[in-house]
Image: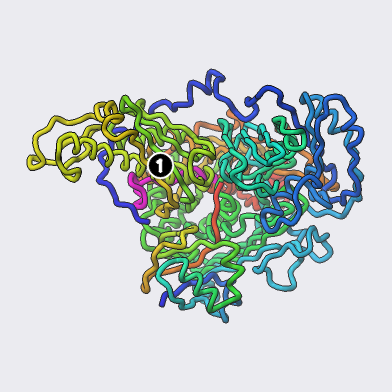
Amino acid sequence: MALDNKNNEFKVIGSTPNRPDGLDKVTGRARFGADISVPGMLHGAVVRSPHAHAKIVKIDASKALAMKGVKAVITRADFPEGLEGEDWNLQENAMAGEKALYDGHAVAAVAATSPLAARDAAKLIEVEYEVLLHVTDVDEAMKDGAPAIREGAADYSVPEGLHPNVVRFFDTGMGDLDKGFAEADLVVERSYTTEAAHQGYIEPHACLGQMGADGRGELWCCTQGHWFIRRMSTAVLGVETTNIRVTPSEIGGGFGGKTTITIEPLSLALSRKAGGAPVKMVMNRGEVLRATGPTSSASMDIKMGMTKDGKITAAHGTFRMQGGAFPGAPVDVTTMLAFANYTIENVHHIGYDVITNRPKQAAYRAPGAPMAAFAVESTVDEMCRTLGLDPIETRLKNASRDGTRSTFGPKFGPVGLVESLEAARDHANYKMPLGPNQGRGVASGYWMNWGGETSASVAMSEDGTVTVSVGTPDIGGSRASMALMAAEAFGIAYENVRVNISDTGALGVNEPTHGSRATYASGLATIKAAEECITKMCKRAADKWGIDADAVIWEDGSAKPSGPNAGEFDPLSIGEICAEMGETGGPISGHYEGSPTGFSGSFGTHVVDVEIDPETGHTTVLRYLVVQDAGKAIHPAYVEGQFQGGAAQGIGWALNEEYIYGEDGRLQNPVFLDYRIPVASDLPMIDTVIVEVPNPGHPYGVRGVGETGITPPLPALANAIADATGLRMRGLPMTPPKILAALKAQKNG
Amino acid sequence: MVEINLWSGLRRFADGKDKVEVSGKTVGEILDDLVARYPGMAPVIKAGVSISVDGEIIPTGRREPVKEDSEVFLLQRLKGG
């Protein structure tokens, strides 16, 4: 669906008003997942496997059930049988069946009258395990002799002869690799690894579920997508979708990790078994890290060819990614987007989705893209250094742009990679002199964005103010963006628009706030629904004036005759029309339902300066620049926030964050003290430049901006460290001990 | 007829071809005809694909129009965070 371009002379778009939820959040009035409480509710706790891989021989809950205050215990026996495909995966992940598949896998749950009683009761549930061989490393899981985690899990795509832990296989490319590599003056072939990193949202998962014996009920939860939660939870429980109404709370971060179910179906199942009493469940941080999805870890081989003057002639990538004990590692995206920054005639990608004894991976900001960017952008940087080429000029020489064919097939439309590279090159940060042990790194990244199923409503109030109802939870300030777009469409003040996140009973199906789609898709829906209201208000004015509706235009919040031939009438303001709507035909509202396809990807370029402490191997990030294409920045401050947030998470992934598994297959660092995300004192002020190459597929030119920002930091940091030390780090995270060891090895020759 | 570009891993389901011709005027019709001509493609389509028509990526819409001279690519189903 191509939408008309508007000759944009914006009045409120591009301003930076306070977010409508700001006061509630700073005063503590905002209600997050764990803030939901109702009279008579019970509290749930989960029994989790202490083993990476074990057969569940027996579960004895008799002691727990005999405890005062305990109202229900559930195991897999309380869930329906016969599910297939991803529904089975979701059910198996929510509650283990015959085997526990990873450290932290839920094997039983209990509901009691207090949180303490529930936790005590969980300790009384006796589980007998038969421990099995395990594997947590992606390369090990593919080797002969590795324990097969689930025979028969592979889909149609996997060729014969691969290990049963390989469950999906991708092979895509174009051109003639042999010819391309023969044309190169330099061919570089390198291997890289990245570790699993968690989304690290501040708010742990929390929900309150209530379901009666008739299978009907309600669920309140923190989520990025409550229609997804409804569909997944009801599928796992074997009840019809509309039986459960899901209401989202405010959300303290998600980054992809709250697009799927964890404890939600457990609270509903416990409630049903406890006679319909509501059951509240709140994860602690250890549960979040052990049992909810981090992103995949990856092992990658890259081969690229380049001429002396910097033309990339060929590229080949092999990507092995583990997504925990279930299919779903984002290797499909990895293989598609790995070389997307560049116009390369001869390119090939191979991808393996591998299962291991780790938690089921979940989406994490540009899922799959940062790993490939680390490998590819590191290789490009190494080639530039070898050939004595400027990294930005070399990227400009090969950059994807309007009309070039992407490495995944289709041609690009208008995109902003060239503009982001030029802005980075011209920025003061790129010219700052560097001192001893300091280095500069550059990398670019891409995310292709998303449309998705979208439903929204706009309703006029009697005083001419406006209520917008959307189905995409507000994580990064989207209510402000929706209000700005509605205000722009109506020609009214931002303050005259209220935006609600509706529950599943109030709108048609909405995909989650994922894929950087909310501002694009819900924004487009808001504008379209507002335009329907405007059409109706013009009709009301036309009826009052006794002229044809086509002779009425809408300007600056009022209906006006379109010209002298339409007659001479004073404009009717939005307030005047709405004040009379009860007598002129009843309520006025507008709707949009659709799956918009005019989304367009966002390119970005990052420049980072670091200083390496030769005594400790510690990396200090001296300055950091994000340049990214937003299409049109609806609320520039929140766009900058997305840029900075992506960079901060990428810096953590590059330098510190990792899932560490012991020989026993258990997670060794399930607390934030040991799983170290960056804190404010670790980071400099992150500078931003917003590039605006309008997306022709959105009325105001919007592109999603949420995900691209996490893609370049991984290679940008590696490239900066290489510049500072001469060391090429090819495994993440680049922790001080690893850098120190590499420095020592370098010193010793 | 409409030409669909397949990703190379699908050649084994399409008689070794990476481009196939099918008939249809919508995304749904060309996908249905693709499966009719190459039954090995059925699990691929069932598992979910995205399709690019003249550079516009259509995640799920079977009713989106396709012209005979459209440039069509079958892509892996995408999702984001």
Identity of the residue furthest to the bottom in this view: B15
Report the predominant secondary structure element of the magenta stretch: loop
Q: Determine whether the residue tagged by mark 1 lies in a helix, strand or loop.
A: helix
Q: Position of residue A277 (x, y in %)?
A: 72, 30
Dot 1: within a 10 Å radius of its alpha carbon, few (fewer than 14), some, or many (20 or more) residues?
Answer: many
Q: Amino acid at mark 1?
A: Gly
State the residue position of label 1.
A523
Q: Is residue A154 visible?
A: yes
Residue at 88% across, 32% down: A64
Identity of the residue furthest to the top in this view: A27
Q: Nearer the viewer, residue A361 or A127?
A: A127
Q: Nearer the viewer, residue A253 or A461?
A: A461
Q: Quadrant of residue A253?
A: top right
Q: Nearer the viewer, residue A143 or A699?
A: A699
Residue at 74% across, 41% down: A290
Q: Nearer the viewer, residue A435 or A594?
A: A594
Tell me where the magenta segment starts and ends, as one range: A694-710
Q: Quadrant of residue A590?
A: top left
Q: Position of residue A671 (x, y in %)?
A: 73, 34
Residue at 54% across, 69% down: B7
Placement of A510 over or under A327, stated as above or below? above
Chain designation of label 1: A
As for residue A699 lying within the magenta part, the answer is yes
Placement of A393 over or under A467, stated as above or below? below
Residue at 53% across, 20% down: A26
Q: Position of residue A190 (x, y in %)?
A: 63, 61
Q: How many marks?
A: 1
| The N terminus of chain A lies in quadrant | bottom left
Horizontal relation, residue A77 to residue A206: left or right: right
